[in-house]
Image (cartoon, rainbow, N blue to C red):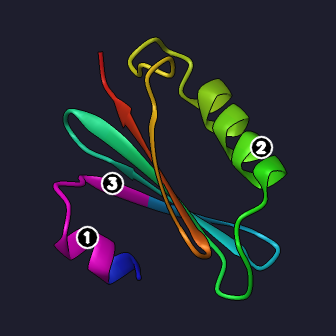
């Protein structure tokens, strides 16, 4: 999945995290960041989305990212959050 993400984005950095059986992939590019939350066994829970959102909002709190306007794409077992850089 990481190789697929690298091949299909303009990312200059990728970090992979795990929350139990849930994988979180953070990619950083020149004009945006993407956060993918993935679980092969079930749908992503709302509290997982909130946890990841809050974690990255604290981690990326230098004012570079616009957390007021995050776009979400959702499919079974997958959430993608797109954050524009200011």
Looking at the rendered image, the disc whose residue lies closer to the viewer, 2 or 3, is 2
Residue 36 position in % (x across, y down): 50, 60
Q: Residues within 10 Å of mark 2 (few under 14, many from 20)?
A: few
Q: Going 31% across and 24% down the picture, which residue do you hit?
A: 85
Residue found at x 70% / y 72%: 43
Q: CA distance from mark 1 to mark 2?
A: 25 Å
Q: Secondary structure at mark 3?
A: strand
Q: Is residue 83 above or below residue 3?
A: above
x, y (%) of residue 14?
39, 59
* Viewer-side label of 1, 3: 1
Judged from this view, the residue extending furthest toward the bottom is 41
Secondary structure under tag 2 reads helix
Q: Which residues are magenta?
A: 4-14
Residue 6 numbered tag: 1
Percent from the top left, x then y, of residue 10?
16, 55
- Residue occupied by mark 3: 13
Which of the two labelled residues, at mark 2 and mark 3, occupies the earlier sequence position?
Answer: 3
Q: Which of the marked residues, 1 or 2, is nearer the chain's N terminus? A: 1
**Magenta-span inclusion, residue 10:** yes
Count of numbered marks:
3
Q: Say above or below: 25 vs 21.
A: above
**Could you give the CA–CA distance between mark 2 and mark 3, rounded to whole angstroms?**
22 Å
Q: Is residue 55 placed above or below 35 in the rendered structure?
A: above
Observer-nearest residue: 79 or 28?
79
Mark 1 falls on what kind of element? helix
Query: In the picture, residue 77 is in which quadrant?
Result: bottom right
Sequence-first disc among 1 and 3: 1
Disc sitting over residue 72 in the figure: none
The answer to whether residue 79 is left or right of residue 12 is: right
Q: Nearer the viewer, residue 77 or 38?
A: 77
8 w.r.t. 80: above or below: below
User: Would you name the residue on which mark 2 appears?
Assistant: 51
């Amino acid at each position: 999945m990481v190789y697929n993400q690298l091949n299909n984005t303009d990312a200059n950095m990728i970090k992979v995290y795990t929350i139990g059986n849930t994988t979180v992939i953070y990619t950083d590019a020149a004009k945006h960041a993407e956060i993918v939350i993935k679980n092969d066994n079930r749908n992503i829970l709302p509290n997982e989305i909130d946890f990841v959102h809050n974690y990255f909002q604290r981690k990326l709190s230098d004012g570079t990212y616009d957390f007021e306007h995050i776009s979400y794409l959702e499919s079974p077992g997958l959430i993608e959050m797109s954050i524009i850089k200011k």
